[in-house]
């Protein structure tokens, strides 16, 4: 055999040996096809999330959230927002399709700023600001927008950036509520839905003017602190005249004006507000300026009744009460006194 033929045979034998070695190595690794393997290391932003934003990636195209390469993309427009009842949460804000909308505690409202990007925005798709309208129960002035890090405009409610949750599969779902302790369904004003239910019930505000029973005089008109209110006969309702000025006001304090929606036992038509000479405003009952007496120490006291024959408590009909009472400086006869003393 010639030298040339020998060299060719040796080259072919070497190639065959190399092929056998590769085959053996492949068999030793279990025969996996690494080009098609699903056990590859995935780029950041894909696969299961462990960043505390809520497990799982974004929903597919049918959910309008985008997924995979679209991580962090804006969701579909909210259109007309609505309020829907949610078990345990009361009223929550939804988009036009009934999907619950959320807020993130790590964002800020003043000024509006979103802290949810990347993987977070894949699980919690930001809601775009365009084409959003407020329905009944939501103040249109509370709607706004914030510019995200990628330059897109995100809807805000009460200053809070608005999101959907990728795992909410159907209208009415609230699976995002409480995730990580930092995600909450939105209330109508941008607050956290369900917060009102957690607060203890507030006592109804006291009436600005009401009626109470006293042992001495029967029913009298009192202010919001339960203090008996008095009329001064030297005042005049028409034309308006204020005779209690200067040092008189150290003892007899002008009653504050009342909200007519906060009355109990007193007809609203009897209540008005008058302007004093110093420009301050004062409660009037049947056009008479009303005062409370510094000599009354607790609710129900009527120590000012009949003082100097010029000061009188007032009944629910707005008329002065003229019968005798346990009054400081009072007497059983209440004829007007010519004295300028007001018992102060």
Image: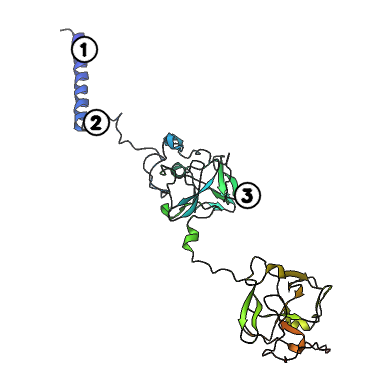
Q: Dot 2: within a 10 Å radius of its alpha carbon, few (fewer than 14), some, or many (20 or more) residues?
A: few
Question: Residue 290, position in %: x, y?
Answer: 73, 77
Disc 2 secondary structure class: loop
Measure how far apart labels 3 and 1 are at the Cα level: 87 Å
Q: Which residue is mark 1?
A: 8
Q: Residue furthest left?
A: 1
Q: On the rendered image, what quadrant is the N terminus found in? A: top left
Q: Residue at x 70, y 73 (%)?
A: 256
Instruction: State which mark lies toward you, 2 or 3.
Output: 3
Do residues under tags 2 and 1 come within 8 Å of each other at their CB atoms?
no
Q: Which residue is mark 3?
A: 141
Residue 170 left/right relative to 302? left
Q: Residue at x 21, y 13 (%)?
A: 7
Disc 3 secondary structure class: helix
Q: Dot 3: within a 10 Å radius of its alpha carbon, few (fewer than 14), some, or many (20 or more) residues?
A: few
Q: Residue at x 74, y 80 (%)?
A: 231
Question: Residue 165, position in %: x, y?
Answer: 44, 45
Relative height, residue 273 to residue 24 (above, below): below
Question: Residue 292, position in %: x, y?
Answer: 70, 80
Disc 1 secondary structure class: helix
Q: Is residue 225 visible?
A: no
Q: Quadrant of residue 206?
A: bottom right
Q: Quadrant of residue 128?
A: top right
- Looking at marks 2 and 3 on the same chain, the residue that comes earlier in the sequence is marked by 2
Measure how far apart labels 2 and 1 are at the Cα level: 34 Å
Measure how far apart labels 2 and 3 are at the Cα level: 61 Å
Do residues under tags 2 and 3 come within 8 Å of each other at their CB atoms?
no
Is 195 in front, or is 166?
195
- Looking at marks 2 and 1 on the same chain, the residue that comes earlier in the sequence is marked by 1
Relative height, residue 108 to residue 130 (above, below): below
Q: Which residue is mark 2?
A: 32
Question: Residue 284, position in %: x, y?
Answer: 74, 73
């Amino acid at each position: 055999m010639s030298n040339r033929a020998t060299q060719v045979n040796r080259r072919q034998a070497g190639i065959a040996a190399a092929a056998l070695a590769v085959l053996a190595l492949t068999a030793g690794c279990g025969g996996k096809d690494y080009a098609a393997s699903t056990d590859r290391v995935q780029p950041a932003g894909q696969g299961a999330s462990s960043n505390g934003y809520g497990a799982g990636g974004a929903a597919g195209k049918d959910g309008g959230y985008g997924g995979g390469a679209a991580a962090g993309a804006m969701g579909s427009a909210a259109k007309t927002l609505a309020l829907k009842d949610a078990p345990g949460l009361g009223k929550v804000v939804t988009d036009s399709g009934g999907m619950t909308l959320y807020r993130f505690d790590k964002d800020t409202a003043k000024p509006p700023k979103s802290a949810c990007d990347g993987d977070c925005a894949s699980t919690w798709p930001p809601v775009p600001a365009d084409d959003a309208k407020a329905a009944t129960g939501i103040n249109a002035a509370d709607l706004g927008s914030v510019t995200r890090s990628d330059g897109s405009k995100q809807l805000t409610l009460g200053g809070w950036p608005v999101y959907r949750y990728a795992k909410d599969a159907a209208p009415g779902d609230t699976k995002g509520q409480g995730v990580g302790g930092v995600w909450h369904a939105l209330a109508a004003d941008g607050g956290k839905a369900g917060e009102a239910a957690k607060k203890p019930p507030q006592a109804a505000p006291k009436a600005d003017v009401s009626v109470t029973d006293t042992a001495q005089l029967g029913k009298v008109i009192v202010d919001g602190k339960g203090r008996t209110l008095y009329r001064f006969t030297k005042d005049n309702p028409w034309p308006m005249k204020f005779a209690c000025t200067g040092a008189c006001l150290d003892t007899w304090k002008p009653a504050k004006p009342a909200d007519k929606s906060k009355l109990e036992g007193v007809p609203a038509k009897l209540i008005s507000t008058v302007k004093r000479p110093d420009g301050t405003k004062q409660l009037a009952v049947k056009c008479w300026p009303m005062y409370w007496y510094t000599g009354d120490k607790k609710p129900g006291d009527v120590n000012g009744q009949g003082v100097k024959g010029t000061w009188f408590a007032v009944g629910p009909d707005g008329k002065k009460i003229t019968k005798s009472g346990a009054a400081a400086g009072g007497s059983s006869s209440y004829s007007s006194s010519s004295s300028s003393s007001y018992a102060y």
